[in-house]
Image: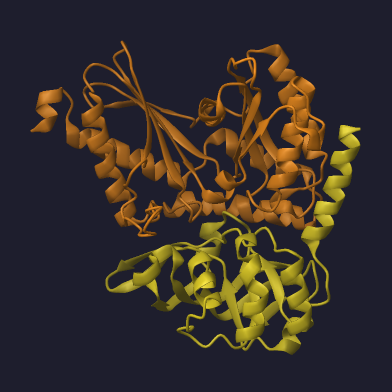
Chain colours: A orange, B yellow
């Protein structure tokens, strides 16, 4: 039994991971649901924008009740795992991959992994680079797993700026960052399903910037940024972004954004990147804490 | 308002931007691979005269020998912008359902051939899947994979909004213009 050797029951781990995938694909986190309802209250009765949010609200309820994917594009599978001693990376990987295969078979995940050279769909969501793992060995006792499913529409709407950017008059300062974020919303309209959420990283290199931008989307929408400067910028972008009147699905209206999360990384003097991970309203993230005995002590994002 | 098959030019020409429509009849899914295939001279496996093409890569599984739609929301349409208009004209496609709208080339063809763009709510895979009452067939699945195949969906009261009509009007054009004006004002 591979489970015996590594100190964790591989079958229990696999079942827990399958349940994590099921919940991620079929249920929105409670902070996102709250934000959708706030948006609904803002939109004018009878407007096309409000109609879009009403359908979205119904869809959230229906997906949960039927235990079926919220959105047919179950996206790229992003998985963060904090691994204690009893859960080696290889054990985790094996269990997660088995869970992904099963989840694809029963329809929690769409067949979403295509060979970029041959165009052939692997049919089981596995292939070079997928799922996208981020492992961190930790000293603690609990295994923490967080995952995100990010669909193609919103991933295609993500954008990276290299400042200065003359087109939008963005210099290498916070005003420049502000201009990038508003521009990102203009560019994303109609492509990423709005209302959206921006995960942003100021600085870093082109690779680390995008990774940090996505990672910051694990923060809850109503959680205040610890950095007061960034907290202010987040609020300002929320207000100005919603004032663009792009609205739900780009139909026009007061709800263009459900959240803005900004983080930062140091940069080399010659570079100033602003990486924007655009997330659609179908913001599927979930996670759990699990003990060595296999018991899930807590689901993240469900309160 | 209701739109029932057959999807004739007369019925389509009567639609205007902003109309909320419920579609009943047979529609076909088709996305990137199908559009490129038809554009490159591939033969359509179904008759596309007066048809509705749905930009959708559904989750469909076989249960007890029958296809069951698990999720079926729209995909981003603009990727088909180079192909859509000419394909409408060549095959008599009367409407497309998708999300995000399409560009001036498609709008021009909508006017020319008498076609419209229906916007389904992006991500609303369950609300939309529920209106697919039967899967009547599937084509090109082995060649392109399940999400890219042509699925024949029998739909009942499938909810969409007209965002581009056959009279040259586009809601997307309007919102882009308005939001860009506001954006420029914010930048000062």
Give B25 or A299, whichever is nearer the viewer. Answer: B25
Residue closest to the far front: A270
- Residue lying at the far top in this picture: please name it: A139
Identify which residue is drawn at 52% across, 58% down. Answer: B125
- In the picture as drawn, the residue positioned furthest to the left comes out as A1
* x then y, percent, for residue B183: 84, 40
Q: How many marks?
A: 0
Whole-percent x and y of residue A7?
A: 15, 22
Q: Quadrant of residue A130?
A: top left
- Is B52 placed above or below B33 here? below
Q: In which quadrant will I find the N terminus of chain A?
A: top left
Q: Is residue B135 left or right of residue B29?
A: left
Residue A121 position by quadrant = bottom left
Q: Nearer the viewer, residue B10 or B146?
A: B146
Q: Is residue A210 above or below residue B96?
A: above
Please give the name of the residue rendered at 49% of the width and 83% of the height, measured from the top-left corner: B44
Q: Is residue B132 visible?
A: yes
Q: Which is more toward the observer, A269 or A109?
A: A269
Q: Position of residue B86 (x, y in %)?
A: 65, 78
Image point (76%, 71%), residue name = B107
Find residue A115 and report its horizontal and vertical position in percent.
37, 53
Examine the rendering and report whether any part of residue B155 can be seen. Answer: no
Q: Is residue B7 above or below residue A260?
A: below
User: Going by the image, does A290 lie left or right of A199?
Assistant: left
């Amino acid at each position: 039994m591979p489970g015996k050797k590594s100190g964790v029951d591989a079958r229990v781990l696999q079942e827990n991971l399958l349940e994590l995938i099921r919940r991620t694909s079929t249920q929105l986190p409670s902070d996102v649901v709250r934000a959708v309802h706030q948006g609904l209250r803002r939109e004018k009765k009878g407007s096309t924008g409000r109609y879009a949010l009403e359908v979205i609200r119904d869809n959230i309820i229906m997906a949960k009740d039927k235990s079926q994917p919220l959105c047919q594009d179950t996206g790229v599978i992003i998985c963060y795992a904090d691994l204690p001693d009893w859960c080696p990376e290889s054990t985790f990987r094996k269990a997660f991959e088995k869970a992904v295969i099963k989840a694809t078979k029963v329809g929690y995940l769409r067949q979403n992994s295509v060979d970029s050279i041959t165009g052939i769909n692997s049919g089981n969501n596995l292939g070079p680079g997928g799922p996208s793992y981020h492992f961190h060995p930790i000293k603690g006792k609990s295994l923490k797993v967080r995952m995100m499913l990010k669909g193609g529409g919103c991933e295609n709407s993500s954008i990276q700026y290299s400042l200065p950017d003359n087109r939008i008059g963005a210099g290498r300062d916070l005003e420049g960052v502000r201009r990038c974020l508003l521009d990102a919303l203009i560019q994303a309209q109609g492509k990423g399903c709005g209302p959206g959420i921006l995960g942003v990283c100021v600085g870093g290199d082109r690779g680390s910037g995008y990774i940090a931008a996505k990672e910051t989307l694990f923060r809850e929408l109503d959680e205040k940024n610890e950095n007061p400067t960034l907290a202010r910028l987040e609020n300002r972008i929320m207000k100005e972004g919603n004032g663009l009147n792009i609205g739900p699905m780009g139909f026009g209206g007061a709800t263009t954004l459900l959240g803005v999360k900004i983080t930062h990384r140091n940069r080399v003097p010659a570079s100033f990147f602003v990486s924007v991970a655009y997330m659609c309203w179908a913001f599927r993230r979930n996670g759990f804490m699990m003990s060595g005995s296999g018991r899930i002590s807590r689901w993240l994002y469900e309160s | 308002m209701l739109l029932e098959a057959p999807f004739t030019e007369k019925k389509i020409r009567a639609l205007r931007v902003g109309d909320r429509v419920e579609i009943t009849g047979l529609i076909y899914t088709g996305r990137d691979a199908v559009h490129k295939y038809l554009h490159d001279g591939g033969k359509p496996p179904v008759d596309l005269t007066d048809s509705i093409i749905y930009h959708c890569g559904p989750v469909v599984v076989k249960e007890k020998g029958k296809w069951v739609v698990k999720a079926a929301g729209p995909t981003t349409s603009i990727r088909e912008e180079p192909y859509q208009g000419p394909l409408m004209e060549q095959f008599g496609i009367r409407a497309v359902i998708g999300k995000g709208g399409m560009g001036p080339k498609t709008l021009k063809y909508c006017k020319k051939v008498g076609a419209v763009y229906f916007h389904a709510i992006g991500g609303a895979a369950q609300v939309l899947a529920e209106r697919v009452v039967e899967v009547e067939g599937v084509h090109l699945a082995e060649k392109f994979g399940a999400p890219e195949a042509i699925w024949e969906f029998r739909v009942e009261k499938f909810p969409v909004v007209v965002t581009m009509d056959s009279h040259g009007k586009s809601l997307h054009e309007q919102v882009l213009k308005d939001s860009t004006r506001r954006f420029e004002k914010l930048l000062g």
